[in-house]
Amino acid sequence: MSVFPKDPDWWRGAVIYQIYPRSFQDSNGDGVGDLLGIVRRLPYIAGLGADAIWISPFFTSPMKDFGYDVADYCDVDPMFGSLADFDQVIETAHALGLKVMIDLVFSHTSDQHAWFKESRATRDNAKADWYVWADPKPDGTVPNNWLGMFGGSAWHWDSRREQYYLHNFLTSQPDLNHHNPDVTQALLDTAQFWLDRGVDGFRLDVVNYYMHDEHLRDNPPLPPAERNDHTAPKVNPYNHQLHLYDKNHPKNLEFLRKLRTLMNAYNAAAVGEVGDSQRGLELLGEYTSGSDKVHMSYAFEFLSGHAPLPAQTFKDVFDQVEELVSDGWICWAFTNHDVERHISRWGLSPAAARLYTSLMVCMRGSLCIYQGEELGLPEAELDFEDLQDPYGIEFWPEFKGRDGARTPMVWEANAPFAGFSTANPWLPVLPAHQRMAADTSNTDPSALIHHYRRALAFRRQHQALRMGDITQVVAQGDLLSFQRRYGDELIQCYFNLSDHPVNATVPAGHWVTIGGELGSIRPSPDHSLNLGPWQPSILLLQED
Ligand code: BGC
Ligand code: MG
């Protein structure tokens, strides 16, 4: 345990490094990453300058959705190790100054969870109402038009109860009935179990999916012009509905208030994943406003897009955040285990990748970076035969699923399987990734990892970047500019989001150039700024 009392605001502006445990580091030669592998690599994460780690689920699971289908919330899957191994993760992380956030999947369980086994046994057992059960329509068809994210109806027939149960994801991920207070109490007990074990916070999986409409009303159709691919690929019919009734229930917030009360006693923090393609930012505001629900919401705004995101997109998002999330807090990510890695998705050159990283560390909010992002890994192109992800198998080839972002972390360029494992890994290590391994990156001064280290250190030095407000957001062609301010510290940022030069004029005042280590350039004495391709200028106001 740290000897320093925990700052209750530790999460604000923090940089959280996301670990996908199956693919981070194997320690026992079975081709699958595990908790002791994480322990071994924690110094690497601390050395990057992250404040915290978020570990994707490592709980007991049949792994149909690779751990997002939990069969026991309070134990570790043997594949990942044991509770004692988890204690080592906590202890080592804390000794290195890293906070530990774990991923609570409270919307659904696995169909192998004891709760579900009991619930499905009869219609009148003690847990009969712990999941969302409904009778068929008179013609035997599903109760309403709700769709599962991973394809098909959100309802699955159970021949024992002769009823349908709800699943927003796989059929093997039955949805918990959050309208039942016994369920919510059991989940709060789960959270307390991990808080007592020393975790510093939670990532709450699909936090806006917890509650459904009790009247099971149909979702209205969404006209094609209003659809987007922010939270589901274009080819997914899930995008054809306005999700009014299967998620985003206003009473979700009551559960979050209870969870917050519990967390406050531990100075723990939560980031809730709020996935909604239409009402995303509005919901982020609802979930994080005041100080009584989740601390921050994980946003999807920068997790889509198939070309370098233009300045105007950043401005639009930042403006909407100011309007809709005025007293809330967002956690941004460019990439994660669910989306195509942004280097490929946005088609970034090394110079562009550096610039977007510099921009990221100047953004208002907290940040998540995803394992391998710091190495500049592109999406792994896999063959259909290599696929593990049921989502990709369902929608192949128009959507190739999430395996391309989940291939093993590459540690050593010259070791078998890039030092991830001594055995054949569960997903292949591509030669193109192996060449970018952490060890070669570390010895190559031009590698992206050095830029990440510098960028994270730079953010740490400036309260205005971590905690400050954001004003004067301007998008002018390819130039994005804004100010960040905290107390007396005022920082003016310019980013050229293009591969050609752009010009700007710096406001009057005595500005000192900072961020030289990120390539930030100085304005001319006449206050004109000539930014080269993908170049930033970051300026600190000096009081005369
Ligand atoms: C997680 C996914 C998972 C889904 C269902 C998501 O948002 O990040 O990996 O498949 O929730 O639990
Ligand atoms: Mg292993």
Image (cartoon, rainbow, N blue to C red):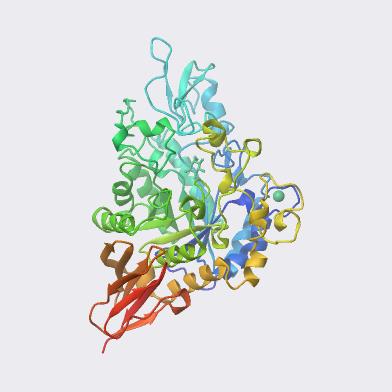
- In the rendered image, residue 20, in percent from the top left (x then y), is placed at 58, 51
In the picture, residue 177 is in which quadrant? top left
Relative to 411, is 484 on the left or the right? Answer: left
- Residue drawn at x 63%, y 39% is 383
**x then y, percent, for residue 99:** 52, 63
Quadrant location of the C terminus in the rendered image: bottom left
Vertical side of 11 occupied by 230: above or below: above
Query: Can see residue 344?
Result: yes
Residue at image location 45% in from the left, 37% down from the top: 183
**Residue 488 appears in the picture as rendered:** no
In which quadrant of the rendered view does residue 96 lie?
A: bottom right
- Above or below, 455 against 197 in this view is below
Residue at coordinates 64% horizontally, 64% vertically from top-left? 438
Total marks in image: 0
Q: Nearer the viewer, residue 374 or 499?
A: 499
Closer to us: 158 or 1: 158
Q: Is residue 234 above or below residue 541?
A: above
Using the image as rendered, state which of residue 204 and residue 354 is in the foreground.
354
Locate residue 458, reporting x and y percent: 45, 74
Left or right? Give the position of 191 relative to 209. Answer: right
Indicate the quadrant containing the N terminus: top left, top right, bottom left or bottom right.
Answer: bottom right
Residue that extends furthest to the top in the rendered view of this protein = 139
Residue lying farthest to the bottom in this orientation: 544
Give x and y (percent) for residue 310.
35, 56
